[in-house]
Amino acid sequence: MAGATVLDIAGGRPGADPTSAPPMVAVRNVTKRFRTRARSGEPDVMVALDRVSMDIDEGELVSLLGASGCGKTTLLRILAGLVKHDEGSVVVQGTTVREPRRDLCMVFQNFGLLPWRTVIANVAFPLELDRMGRAEREEVAARYIETVGLKGFERHYPHELSGGMQQRVGIARALTRKPLVLLMDEPFAALDAQTRESLQEDFLRIWKDLRTTVIFVTHSIDEALVMSDRVMIFTPRPGRLRRTIESPFGPDRVDRDVRALPDFARCRQEIRQMLREEPQ
Amino acid sequence: MSKVQQGLPTLEAGRGAGAVAWLKAHPNIVRAASVIVFFGYWEWAARDMSPLFMTYPSAIFRAAWAITANGELPQAFLASLWPFAIGLFISIVGGIALGVLIAQFWFLEYVLDPFLNALYAIPRVALVPLIILWAGLETTGKVTILVSIAIFPVIINTYAGIKDVRGGLLEIGKAYGATESQIFFKIILPASVPYIMAGVRLAVGLAIIGMVVAEFFTAITGLGGLIVNYSNSFATAKLFVPIIVIGLLGVALTEFVMWIERRLSRWRALERERF
């Protein structure tokens, strides 16, 4: 099968090469169980993540792909320090993640804006929590508002913006702290198809300029292929990392419509097959 | 062809329907006409009735002029205003503080819950004799009666507002490493403002009721006192004046609070429109 595939399945990782620089993010054997109560009333344990390991290099854009319930969002929340895992370790730039950290910033699926705050006050929110002065933080916020293409909307309220514009605010807010790792939880899933594509393109351009490490959760094969350097494929019950795939399009994918490339359809087909054929 | 034939009768009927539609589109004209007719009829019909029993608009107007000129009304108004302002202030500040405390600290909630529920269940007017016994007939007693009536919506709405803050909003704070106090002051409190303001609006209306009740049952002073005194001396035209002033005070204050409420809660109303 290997000879026939377009995709290069990256078997060497995780963390196989000791000569290279230490990874930005190192996930080792992370297991997470949720206690659920079955209908009978007996406690039941659901394994959301089963011994997941991965390394992510600095500046990489990696997506976690899988159907709902495969643990990809749980892993992202563990990386964000919002959820405690039961076993294993999560280390970002040499420091273990135990609680939310200022250098790990989150972009939420439902945008997560504070509706009573203007755009600039939302974007400056993390810096306000860091007790930065008003003038200084608004200056930084204004810069990132321009980066995401919302110059002129600083004094608008979230409800005055479209969904796509709201998520641009969410991205700008996450960038203000210059995070080591940007954690994105299905950031474009709530948008309509056209808006989604234009945000994908714009975000890739921003990422190319800033070179932040990005971990991107998605359930869309297309989105994973368009966006990422590597795609991590998860399967549910128990949530496991099945395969890691190097992007066949490389860094050239920015500023270019990879959907139109002949390989795109074939890659998509192969990934779909992988998601489907994995044993339960 | 058949369309044309059907079209003609509807055009005829359209004339009458047009006038109805016009009235429906101009509700203020209908409202104004209704009020004018009411006052006109009252003025005309009540002139022949005994002035001890009934009065009419122009007599009320003259009475208002008279008791304003001799200082009775302004004096009563100011006498009412002082305990009213203190009582409303305590109801708002104390109500918000209590609501926040019982919403944030489960222990306080469980400790205070039975008493708040009991007090809320008892009609507060029933407590007036006890309050007078303990707090006296003067300002302290009046303020206590007023607060006992007006504070509850503020407590309840503040509590409900804080409990209703969506988990998603709290998670934003957590993900960005906000401290407990930052989460409270930058997320929980602003998110509850629409609820709190609705409580304040209800408190204003109840505070006016509390004020009048207090002035009826304690030392007879203020606008409530005027009502009692004019009623006892069968000065029916004068009796209407403090009633109208109290009504206007209620409308003005409620409008003022609603104006603030709209400004502070605009994000919420507009957010709701979207869904």
Image (cartoon, rainbow, N blue to C red):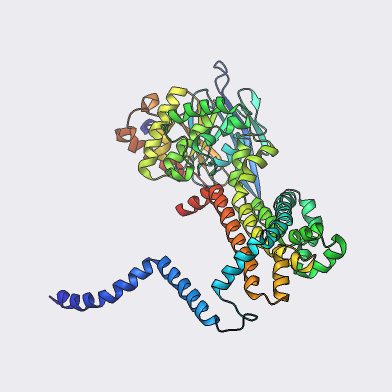
Left or right, B96 with reference to A178: right
A231 vs B121: above or below: above
The reply to whether residue A1 is visible in this rendering is no
The quadrant in which residue B169 appears is: top right
Residue B192 at x, y = what percent? 62, 49
The quadrant in which residue B211 appears is: bottom right
Residue at left offset 53%, top offset 28%: A138
Quadrant of image for the N terminus of chain A: top left
Left or right, B154 with reference to A278: right
Residue at left offset 59%, top offset 77%: B55
Left or right, B38 with reference to B248: left
Residue B241 at x, y = what percent? 62, 68
B172 vs B60: above or below: above
B60 vs A75: above or below: below
Residue at left offset 38%, top offset 69%: B24
Residue at left offset 40%, top offset 36%: A199
Foreground: A270 or A65? A65
Foreground: A72 or A188? A188
